Image (cartoon, helix red, strand yellow):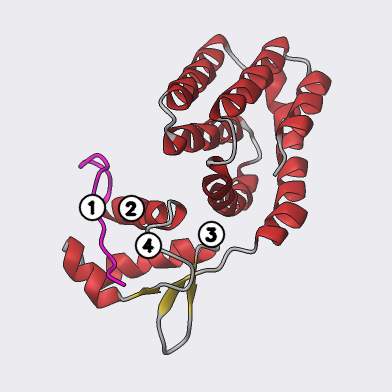
């Protein structure tokens, strides 16, 4: 199938990041299907970049589990194991994020709460407009914001690797789920964070993170 991408991100973003984001989104939204072959020469020619830049983006996507590079052959879109996401990725995410929010909650500032509130409001707008992409990306942004505040920077690559596969699950399941309920869950988590009570936050986070 043709591998076609259109840049929709800000021009000031580094080229590699723009390419990475566009291909990632094409996979997450189903424009690129599992086992679709990614022909480097074709993609590089279509979007006007060097193959070296493209390969850097594909290596990152491989680390995220979204593509598979086969030696001396080609790169293809990975088949996401939904059972593995439910049985392994989500439990691992629970452990990581519950640990994280317990550490972060007491240190949150008023500007942090304002930023998190803004993300939830954007999620609510997305739900009202039935915009799955807007809801999912703000869902991820909410948790990324908390992780970025943590002093455990070595956890970020672990979480990012999981988040891409969780995104795939969200996009596949999103049409079957009430998008307002996703915003509601984050509203509840934000209210718990406002208490700055680590145990309350941990309890709500544990209930919040589920397939």
Chain-order first, disc 1 or disc 3: 1
Q: Position of residue 56 (x, y in %)?
A: 37, 65
Mark 2 falls on what kind of element?
Answer: helix
Q: Are marks 1 and 2 in contact (CB under 8 Å)?
A: yes
Distance of mark 2 from mark 4, alpha carbons?
10 Å
Question: Label 3 neighbourhood size at 10 Å, few (<14), some (14-19), many (20+)?
Answer: many
Mark 1 falls on what kind of element?
Answer: loop
The region drawn magenta spans 1-14
Q: Quadrant of residue 5?
A: bottom left
Residue at left 25%, top 62%? Answer: 4
Picture layout, residue 138 above or below residue 38? above
Q: Nearer the viewer, mark 2 or mark 4?
A: 2
Residue behind mark 2:
22
Residue behind mark 4:
57
Residue at left 23%, top 52%? Answer: 6
Residue at left 48%, top 26%? Answer: 127
Disc marking residue 64: 3
Q: Quadrant of residue 39?
A: bottom left
Mark 3 falls on what kind of element?
Answer: loop
Distance of mark 1 from mark 2, alpha carbons?
7 Å
Q: Nearer the viewer, mark 3 or mark 2?
A: 2
Disc marking residue 6: 1
């Amino acid at each position: 199938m043709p591998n076609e991408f259109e840049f929709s991100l800000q021009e000031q973003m580094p080229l590699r990041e723009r390419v990475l984001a566009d291909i990632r989104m094409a996979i997450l939204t189903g424009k690129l299907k599992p086992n679709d072959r990614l022909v480097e020469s074709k993609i590089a020619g279509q979007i006007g970049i060097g193959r070296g830049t493209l390969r850097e983006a594909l290596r990152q996507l491989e680390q995220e589990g979204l593509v598979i590079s086969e030696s001396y052959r080609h790169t293809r879109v990975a088949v996401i194991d939904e059972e593995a996401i439910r049985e392994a990725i989500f439990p691992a995410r629970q452990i990581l994020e519950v640990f994280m929010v317990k550490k972060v909650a007491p240190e949150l500032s008023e500007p942090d709460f304002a930023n998190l509130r803004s993300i939830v409001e954007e999620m609510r707008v997305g739900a009202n407009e039935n915009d799955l992409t807007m809801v999912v990306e703000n869902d991820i942004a909410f948790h990324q914001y908390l992780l970025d505040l943590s002093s455990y920077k070595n956890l970020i690559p672990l979480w990012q690797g999981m988040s891409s596969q969780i995104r795939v699950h969200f996009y596949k399941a999103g049409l079957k789920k009430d998008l307002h309920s996703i915003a509601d869950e984050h509203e509840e988590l934000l209210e718990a964070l406002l208490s700055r009570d680590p145990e309350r936050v941990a309890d709500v986070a544990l209930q919040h993170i589920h397939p």
